[in-house]
Image (tube, grey):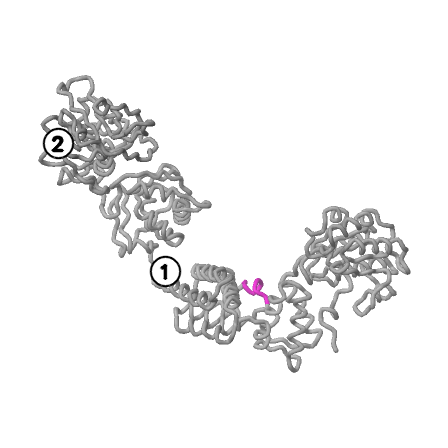
Amino acid sequence: MTTALYRRYRPESFGEMIGQSQVTEPLMTALRGDRVGHAYLFSGPRGCGKTTSARILARCLNCAAGPTDTPCGTCDSCVELGRGGGGSLDVVEIDAASHNGVDDARDLRERAVFAPARDRFKIFILDEAHMVTPQGFNALLKLVEEPPDHVKFIFATTEPEKVIGTIRSRTHHYPFRLVPPAAMLEYVQELCATEGVEVEAGVLPLVVRAGGGSPRDTLSLLDQLIAGSEDSRVAYARAVSLLGYTHAELLDEVVDAFGAGDAAAAFAAVDRVVQTGQDPRRFVDDLLERLRDLIVVAATGQGAASVLRGLSAEDLARMQRQADTYGASRLSHTADLVIATLDDMTGATSPRLQLELMVARVLARGADAAATPVAAPPVAAPVAAAPPVVAPDATPAQPSAAPAAPVPSGPVTLQRLRDAWPEVLGNLEGISRSSWLLASGASVSSLAGDVLTLSFQSQADVAKFKHLAAGKGPSEDLRQAIIAVLGLRVKYLAKYEPGAGHPDEPPPPDDEPPPAPEDPSAPPVGRSAPATVPPAKQARPARSAPAADRPESARASDAPAPRPSAAAAAPVTEWAVAPIPTDADAPPPDPAPDARSQFAVDDEPEDAAGAASAVRIATLAPPREGEVLPTAEVAVSVDPDEAEDAPVEIAVDAPVPPVIAPPLPPAAATRSDGVQRYGEAVIRQVLGATFIREEPYEQPTRFS
């Protein structure tokens, strides 16, 4: 029977501790200066030396030559508290997991009253102190706060937050940490040399990785490997099989297959992982570890040996070749895909499916990277599949097959932004496909400092562009793409401008006015053609602001529009309102119209030079209690001299839920003057009228 390695090599002094200098050095200084406290709290992960340090501190305090920072190791106290010692009567170790109640605290108080049997101090070491109940801690509080001069307390715990604050405030708290891999690797190498054990290359790094920074866990794993090896030689294959890690040859096979784009070899390696019973998640974790090593090699070159300790020169050279095959950018993208797969595997019902999908994504990304020439100027990948984006005052975009001109350096101007726009969109596609689709339909209107004005083809695109959820959205994705390409963080002005900078239509030159449409009745570019209506439904715009105060897009439509006639119906624009018909333009009365789809239009005054004429626009108004609501009306004052050519700019109020009135008698469908009535359905759906405001409805006398 042999003693476990972690027991045979347990430190006997603070100088033998590894990786805990933040604890050992202050304690040794306090011991040398005779400034030792009465209570200590040691906290940290499991197996990192808390209980061992408590025993070393007890040896230092009760050493015959002490108190000292270096125990002599020969006195009775040092021997009894050493590796092979049976323990001292004056050093009491209590397992707080099984002694955590009020009765145990009362018993400890009674024992603390008695003086030490032989040594200088009576020391109580409470292991797993977080298991003590609050009642037990409260019963122990008075003793910990004011103990006898010969009593010292040392609490050891992995969860210091569970120790009540009144106890923590009366102790000196020392946090322990996990041992760094470099220090742990050096320690196990010395231990193997001391034990006379030969270890193949690559075994100790796996042992250190599996130990997770805990000296006790690391020595336990190494002890297991040594015990299961023959002729005192630890083989790499046996270590990989026992620890559950992926063999380096299999990782090399997968990495080489990814680099060469060999799908058959990659999927064959995945099948080997599954057929040999390995955990797919562990394989993905090992692959991510290898990609991390390749990224370090690609970044540091020959200096990687100082970062990746434990690698032989042959392994380092092989990894250098693999890193050169990928390149730093491709390695980073591949690692991102592997990390995403590792997250998706948490709780997955089919880890193999996730693994195979990851292989497919990595191969597809590698094929895209190989298809892009390295020496060519940067050309946005999605431009080849999407219509070219043309700014309003820029030259038409070139076909995607032609290489884009290099973006000039210097201050970011409007022209430079437009030249780099394809590259910005290409970068945006790598961030978010949906954001790229939205930004591809926009055009760059202006750039004033860091304020970028974008024009969109619809109000819905403007709303989508402005939408943010948890700080993310199309606008933020585009901002990051612009930063990546031009280094400029922009602010946005997103506006709805139909027909401006449409990707399928190059703009006219700056010095020529836009050509007039061939068909005067055709709708403006960028808008869907609205339905045409009879002359009685035609609209004549009204002026609400001078032309100089309106935007350029509104002034462009100031040309006089032709008078609608019964023979030809003009299209109804977005701001069209109901016309003022004459008796000659009125259609014949409908003998039985539906009263729910009608509205009243007053006749146009015969005197056109009058001060103003009234235009009636059908709106929706809530009915009064006890009234029947056939329709509602709103009057807008219009100057007859400007009514022909002035566009309408009406402030749109909040929409009112529609109110459907009951049908009226057939006799009320037509007014006595012969004017046809058109109701809510015609106003909203056919004429495209807009709700302005509410006005009380007054019951006509003919319904009384």
Numbered disc total: 2
Q: Look at mark 2 in the image and give the residue it sits on.
A: 589
Asked if residue 466 lies left or right of residue 37, the reply is left
Asked if residue 361 can be seen in this view, the reply is yes
Element class at badge 1: loop
Q: Is residue 179 left or right of residue 141?
A: left
x then y, percent, for residue 62? 85, 59
What x and y, as percent, mark residue 505?
A: 22, 46
> Which residue is the site of mark 1?
374
Contact, mark 1 vs mark 2 (Cβ under 8 Å) = no
The correct choice, above or below, for 309 with respect to 197 in the image is above
Q: Residue at x 39, y 68 (%)?
A: 261
In the displayed orientation, state which residue is furthest to the bottom. 231
Question: Range of the magenta residues?
Answer: 303-309
| Residue shown at 74% from the left, 55% from the top | 132
Residue placed at 79% from the left, 68% from the top?
83
Of the pair 686 and 163, the residue shown nearer to us: 686
Residue 593 falls in which quadrant of the image? top left
